[in-house]
Image (cartoon, helix red, strand yellow):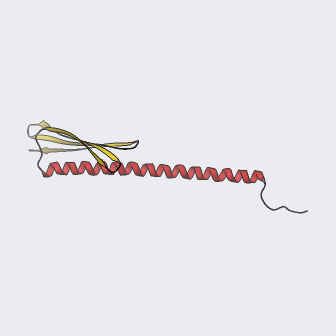
């Protein structure tokens, strides 16, 4: 009896389907990783901006009761920075720095709060 070498058409189709499933799964994993990295980078930038704003306020002396809002664009990300100083009690105030950042469909926001006494 003579033995044939090679693959049948059905075996080729099954092998192709297995390869497509593996490639599709890998593509989804890479997309998930890239999206996560972008989210982390956006949050890191927002934290750096909020920390710099807080340090600037501390360095220049805490202002009187104030509320400010400004926008800033860094690279392809847009940030909105809200700063406020509120009086909690006589001689006690609170500095709040809120940053909201967006890049494409990704949005993040964070808030730093510091209480100080005069």
Q: What residue sits 49% from the left and 50% below the top?
A: 31
Indicate whether 85 appears above or below 56: above
Instruction: Tell me how many marks there are.
Output: 0
Q: Is residue 111 left or right of residue 39?
A: left
Q: What residue sits 45% from the left and 51% below the top?
A: 34
Tell me the quarter of the picture where residue 81 sits.
Answer: top left
Indicate whether 7 appears above or below 113: below
Q: What residue sits 66% from the left and 52% below the top?
A: 18
Q: What residue sits 78% from the left and 60% below the top?
A: 6
x and y percent of residue 88 in the render?
14, 37
Q: Is residue 31 left or right of residue 52?
A: right
x and y percent of residue 93 in the render?
13, 40
For this orientation, the residue located farthest to the right is 1
x and y percent of residue 40 in the render?
38, 50
Quarter holding the C terminus is top left
Quarter holding the N terminus is bottom right
Q: Nearer the viewer, residue 70 or 64?
A: 70
Q: Nearer the viewer, residue 1 or 45?
A: 45
x and y percent of residue 29 in the render?
52, 51
């Amino acid at each position: 009896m003579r033995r044939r070498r090679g693959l049948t058409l059905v075996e080729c189709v099954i092998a192709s389907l297995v390869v497509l499933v593996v490639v599709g799964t890998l593509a989804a994993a890479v997309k998930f990783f890239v999206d996560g990295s972008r989210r982390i980078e956006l949050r890191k930038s927002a934290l750096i901006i909020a920390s710099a704003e807080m340090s600037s306020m501390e360095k220049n002396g805490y202002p009187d009761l104030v509320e400010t809002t400004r926008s800033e664009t860094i690279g392809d990300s847009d940030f909105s920075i809200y700063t406020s100083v509120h009086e909690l009690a006589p001689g006690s105030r609170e500095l709040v720095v809120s940053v909201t950042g967006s890049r494409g469909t990704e949005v993040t926001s964070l808030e730093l709060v510091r209480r100080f006494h005069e």
